[in-house]
Amino acid sequence: MPDTLPGLSAFAIYAGLALWQGRGWLGAQPKNPSQLFYVLATLALCVHGFSVYKLIDTANGFNFEFFRVSSLIFWVINITVLISSIKLPVQSLLPPLFAMTALAVLCSVLVEGSYTPHALTYPIAIHILLSILAYSILTIAALQAVALSAQNHLLKTRRLQTAMALLPPLQTMESLLFEMLWAGTILLALSIVSGLFFLDDILAQHLAHKMFFSVAALCVYCILLFGRHVHGWRGKQAIRWTIGGFVALMLAYFGTKLVLEILLT
């Protein structure tokens, strides 16, 4: 019970905040969060982070079970979006995000998966966590790029005006996309560097394909961020580069299995 208490506490706070801030959705008029809201959200993040630590770093080793990792991913996303909400009008994203986070936290506490904890060194565990977080954040960025493209199309065709009113403005969604890309790219770079330092003989472990496509994806994202900063890339150009980086990232994630299990058999 002591190990589940932080998670249940985080679930209760997230659920309460989602209901509180979600009242604006009923009238399609999202309200700006109050100072108390941010205080409670910060408390939820602290308790949530402690819960993630207790659930992943267990006495039997590191447990990367699906729901526990999902809880970690939502924790990182919440930090990114909450910080972004200080300068960007993304308050309408907070109710559904906190509701999904509450569900993920509850599942991480109550659902026992079949994953067997492994006794890993901290450097290897950190590398794995960085990789999982990088892939997850950049996958969400790719989904957001698709949503951005759909939002742009709907606005041009004047469809679903009520639904679009619940979402942040197009420019805000684009700014949030690049916030996600910055976070994901930094995590991806750290995961690559940690892999080079902490994994013994990458070529012998058949990780060469993963490393190649990971570096390729990193280059794509760095070019996109450079183009955004220097040339002001946005819109369709940003969406295309985001999707291109995601394709390279998926080849890194699944490429080794494809080459070893299909192409070389």
Image: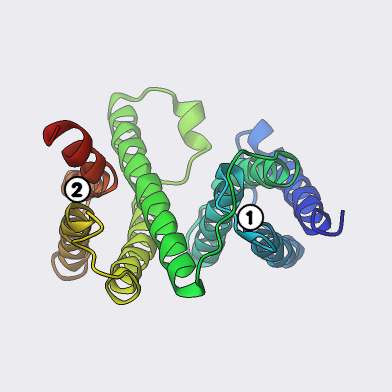
SS of the residue under disc 1: loop
- Residue 201 drawn at (x, y percent): 24, 68
- Cα–Cα span, label 1 and label 2: 38 Å
Percent across and percent down for residue 127 are 41, 66
Closer to us: 155 or 58? 58
Mark 2 nearby-residue class (10 Å; few <14, some 14–19, many ≥20): many
Identity of the residue drawn at 55% across and 46% down: 93
Question: Is the residue 80 above or below the residue 249 in the image?
Answer: below
Q: Is residue 205 left or right of residue 216?
A: right
Q: Position of residue 35 (x, y in %)?
A: 72, 66
Residue drawn at (43%, 55%) of the image: 132
Q: Foreground residue, 68 or 115?
A: 115
Q: Is residue 157 depicted above or below 21 in this figure? A: above
SS assignment at label 2: helix
Image coords of residue 74 (percent x, y): 56, 51
Q: How many marks?
A: 2
Residue position marked by numbered label 2 in the rendering: 248
Residue bearing mark 1? 32
- Looking at the rendered image, the quarter that the C terminus falls into is top left
Res 30 seen here: no
Q: Along the horizontal axis of the image, is 245 left or right of 186?
A: left
The amino acid sitting under disc 1 is: Asn
Q: What crowding class fits label 1: few (fewer than 14 Cα within 10 Å), some (14-19), or many (20 or more)?
A: some
Please give the name of the residue rendered at 43% of the width and 61% of the height, measured from the top-left corner. Answer: 128
Outermost residue to the right = 1
Using the image, determine if residue 170 lies above or below residue 163: below
**Residue 140 visible (yes or no):** yes
The circle drawn on residue 99 is: none
Q: In the rendered image, which quarter is residue 25 located in?
A: top right
Q: Name the residue type under label 2.
A: Ala
On the image, which quarter does residue 195 sit in? bottom left
